[in-house]
């Protein structure tokens, strides 16, 4: 009889072990997680072994995780050292201290002009003033113009929510951006006009007369025979612009870098053309693009769709790029991931880009080793979430149980 009881106990114990929930099952059972609208894929970069997989081919909304796609594309094509250049021309004849013509600023899509965030950018208005003084010019008879011809199409994709367009995070991307195209928490729809007003005041206060009006448009230098480069304003290196974009999840930076990607590929500088070019680019690199729809570079559009397979493939493709992983916030320490996994054994061992909007919480990035080199790719796409803090906690627990 004792032997039968012992065997029964052992069988019961074995059954309890057999049916113990896996980290993935526990995650999916969380009341804040919609199992059918969630995808997870975690892989070992060295071996290709899949640690966790769920709905990896499901088409889902990525929110700001889309920035990992945009930055990876531009980084792959242009590297880290390139800069945005905003040239300023004297368009006319200089006679003594008079410019008989126009002052023309050619927009380059630089998102850092006058920005109140890193990477810091020199005040282009002061640069122009100092250059005019050095050239001995105290009067401009013509117009002060901004050439906006670099970008085609609307500043914001039509699919962006109307309410977002009013907010600073929803401002559009322009050939000439200024002060992050925002005034406080509100978007500015005409940053060129704001810049021109500031420049005109700067020149006026310094005693430089301007005879014509200030305006923005698609007309560049009119008289190339009598044009002269006054200054070439340069941004910080792309590496620092990309890092700032990813750390702060800056939509304006991402949208301008998407357009920069399109232009460097010889395509049109519109958002729609750039989005199409980027999707085709990744398809050409062999990434699984079934179920993928790229609408913008920032992830603000709710029409974007990606799969965990797609994001994971890009992460694996970029795994050996030393700069790419460094753009992502460290868990428990930086940017949008500052409170995630804080005071856990994984703090500072996970670097990921977050993506969040109403009903959405997403993560994409890497598990790191002691030297901050990527060892595993991580993709967690949660759509239809319940309470956000519970969904975030569920993702934390999944990672801790998977990697400990």
Image: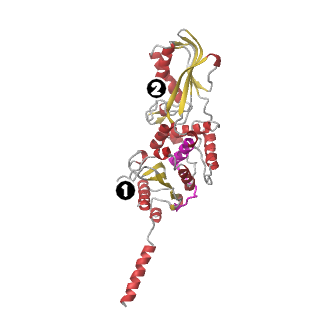
Q: Give the magenta range.
A: 52-75
Picture residue at 54% right of the left edge, 45% below the top: 72
Q: Residues within 10 Å of mark 2 (few under 14, many from 20)?
A: few
Residue 220: image quadrant is: top right
- The answer to if 53 sits in the magenta stretch is yes
Count of labels in the image: 2
- Per the image, the residue denoted by label 1 is 345
Q: Alpha carbon of mark 2 to alpha carbon of mark 1: how far? A: 44 Å
User: Farthest residue toward the top?
Assistant: 96
Q: Which mark is residue 123?
A: 2
Colour scheme of this structure image? secondary structure
Q: Position of residue 2 (x, y in %)?
A: 36, 89
Residue 160 seen anywhere in this rendered image of the structure: no
Task: Give the number of the mark in front: 2 or 1.
Answer: 1
Q: Position of residue 233 (x, y in %)?
A: 51, 26
Depth order, front residue of 59/171:
59
The answer to whether the residue labelled 2 contacts the one labelled 1, judged by CB atoms less than 8 Å apart, is no
Picture residue at 43% right of the left edge, 49% below the top: 372
The correct choice, above or below, for 291 with respect to 267 in the image is: below
The correct choice, above or below, for 252 with respect to 359 in the image is: above
Q: Position of residue 296 (x, y in %)?
A: 57, 43
Quarter of the rendering occupied by the N terminus:
bottom left
Quarter of the rendering occupied by the C terminus:
bottom left
């Amino acid at each position: 009889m004792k032997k039968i009881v012992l065997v029964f106990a052992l069988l019961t114990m074995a059954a309890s072990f057999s049916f113990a929930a896996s980290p993935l099952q526990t995650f999916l059972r969380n009341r804040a997680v919609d199992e059918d609208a969630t995808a997870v894929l975690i892989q070992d970069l060295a071996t290709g072994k899949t640690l966790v997989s769920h709905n990896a081919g499901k088409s889902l909304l990525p929110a700001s995780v889309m920035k990992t796609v945009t930055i990876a594309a531009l980084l792959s094509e242009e590297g880290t050292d390139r800069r945005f250049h905003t040239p300023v021309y004297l368009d006319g004849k200089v006679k003594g201290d008079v410019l008989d013509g126009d002052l023309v600023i050619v927009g380059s899509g630089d998102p850092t002009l006058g920005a109140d965030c890193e990477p810091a950018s020199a005040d282009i208005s002061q640069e122009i003033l100092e250059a005019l003084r050095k050239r001995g010019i105290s009067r401009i008879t013509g117009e002060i113009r901004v050439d906006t011809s670099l970008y085609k199409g609307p500043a914001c994709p039509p699919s962006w929510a109307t309410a977002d367009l009013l907010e600073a995070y929803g401002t559009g991307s322009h050939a000439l951006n200024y002060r992050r195209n925002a005034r406080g928490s509100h978007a500015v729809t005409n940053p060129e006009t704001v810049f021109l007003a500031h420049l005109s005041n700067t020149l006026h206060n310094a005693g430089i007369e301007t005879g014509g009006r200030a305006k923005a448009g698609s007309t560049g230098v009119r008289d190339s025979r009598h044009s002269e480069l006054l200054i070439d304003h340069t941004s910080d290196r792309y590496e620092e612009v990309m890092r700032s974009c990813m750390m702060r999840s800056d939509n304006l930076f991402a949208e301008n870098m998407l357009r920069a990607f399109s232009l460097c590929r010889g395509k049109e500088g519109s958002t729609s053309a750039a989005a199409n070019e980027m999707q085709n680019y990744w398809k050409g690199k062999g990434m699984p693009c079934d179920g993928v729809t790229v609408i913008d570079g920032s992830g603000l559009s709710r029409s974007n769709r990606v799969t965990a397979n797609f994001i994971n493939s890009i992460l694996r493709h970029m795994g050996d790029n030393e700069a790419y992983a460094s753009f992502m916030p460290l868990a428990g320490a930086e940017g949008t991931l500052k409170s995630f996994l804080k005071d856990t054994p994984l703090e500072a061992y996970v670097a990921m880009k977050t993506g969040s909007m109403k009903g959405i919480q997403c993560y994409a990035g890497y598990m790191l080793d002691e030297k901050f080199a990527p060892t595993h790719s991580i993709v967690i796409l949660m759509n239809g979430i319940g309470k956000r803090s519970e969904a975030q906690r569920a993702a934390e627990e999944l990672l801790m149980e998977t990697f400990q």
